[in-house]
Amino acid sequence: MTLTLPFDNSYARLPDRFYARQSAVPVRDPGLIAVNAGLARALGLDPEALTTPEAVTSFAGNATPDGAEPLAQAYAGHQFGGWSPQLGDGRALLLGEILAPDGRRFDIQLKGSGPTPFSRRGDGRAWIGPVIREYIVSEAMAALGLPTTRALAAVTTGEPVWRESALPGAVLVRVASSHIRVGTFQYFAARQDTEALRLLTDHVIARHYPDAQTPLDLLDAVTAAQAHLIAGWMSFGFIHGVMNTDNMTISGETIDYGPCAFMDEYHPQKVFSSIDQYGRYAYGNQPRIAVWNLAQFASCLLPLMGEEEPAIEAATAAINRFPDLYEAEWLHSFRAKIGLSTEEDGDAALIEALLASMAEGGADFTRTFRGLSDGTAATEFADPEAFESWFNDWRARTAREADPKATMRAANPAFIPRNHRVEEAIRAAVTGDYAPFHRLNSILARPYDDQPDAIEYRAAPADDEIVTRTFCGT
């Protein structure tokens, strides 16, 4: 008996050059780490059925669910600005797509399921650390209210994965509106395959942006979606860490939680990724990198947009709208974070002044903003007097608001997936202890609630717990 899912695989109906068909590579001894019951129910699936031995076997890649059409998607991309004409799913397989009860379409993907034609000499596997990290952080992002891929399940493989040493292997079952990336368009643009670009554009419009009528409309829609997403990242102190064009989804969802991190102490040039040696993807650079990535997307659409010069002008105008869209999204988010539900001309300056003071004073990003609503924000500053002058201006501004405290508490989480807590869960999981993983997930599912029994998870790391670097895991 194999797992049965209600597959309807639209991407598999595209021409063969969009992907490589293959099955996952079986593993020795699959075991269940977790099933995301809430997500399963939202997808119209029975959570209990996903915990059966048959389901675990399918999630590990030892059996192909009925109706699945496993394939590795082809794409290209700019990685840290350098062009790679062929990347693709090197350790992942799209099992297929399902329609949720609300009519939305979702990909079901196995990540860590073995080598594919796109593996580039890699083993196609994932060790348990990146699987645990992506499960925790992607689900935390969903609970915070940001567009993201999700984790449906995680399983062990019973086999070691060799990185610098032998580590336990695992597979993540990832859910996304789609896994189509800027790099997917780049793959065909680089090959001057206009027919494939047109098919891909039509597929994306039908799937994600049905109100779009033209490739330019699609560019406008994707630009707006990315402005919303990046502003959301910024409002929670999130650093993606590897904003390559193959890691920017056309749907506007966060994808590929490799060397990602939420900041503790705030600084706009904060970098965690071990592979980002020059700070290209630092916290404060993320909006600019989004524009750069969108420009690459726009260049792929040019062959579909008519005469060359008018097409370039129209695409340039679309990309140039990003700063205004982003600023509006950013200001909306940060207004709420300081308790403002109305708009006044000086609000941006007030927010920027707080951020500058936080950077200078080494203030914790999440605790400072949450502390505004309970009177503890000043304690986050090495010199509380430096906070006091801003506080007086802010108090005068919020006096004109109806309920600033409620606004702030709805916008500022008490709990985020702090790096040291994620690392704690990973270290335990390597030994087979998943209790810290489950405990952390349970807390992060309700990030805006006080949860007095979990107060220690609100704490900033002690000096010996600070994580300064995060890793991709491949």
Image (tube, rainbow, N blue to C red):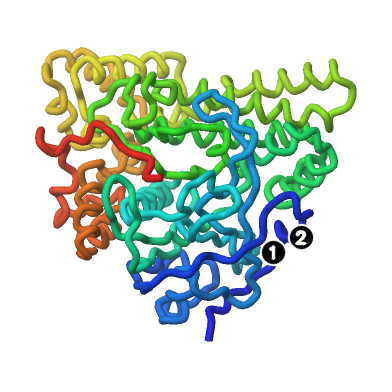
Residue 3 horizontal/vertical position (percent): 53, 79
Residue 210 horizontal/vertical position (percent): 75, 48
User: 47 or 244: nearer the eye?
Assistant: 244
Camera sees residue 400 = yes
Location of the C terminus by quadrant is top left
Secondary structure, mark 2, is helix
Task: Give the residue displayed 55% in from the left and 72% down from the top.
Answer: 44
Task: Give the residue displayed 52% in from the left and 58% down from the top.
Answer: 175
Give yes or no for contact between labels 2 and 1 (Cβ–Cβ under 8 Å): yes
Q: Is residue 396 left or right of residue 282?
A: left
- In the rendered structure, find residue 9 and report the number of the disc placed on it: 1
Residue 105 horizontal/vertical position (percent): 64, 60
Label 1 neighbourhood size at 10 Å, few (<14), some (14-19), many (20+)? many
- In the rendered structure, find residue 13 and report the number of the disc placed on it: 2
- Looking at the image, the residue that sits furthest to the bottom is 1
Mark 2 belongs to which amino acid? Answer: Arg
When the figure is inspected, residue 426 is found, relative to residue 278, above or below; the finding is below
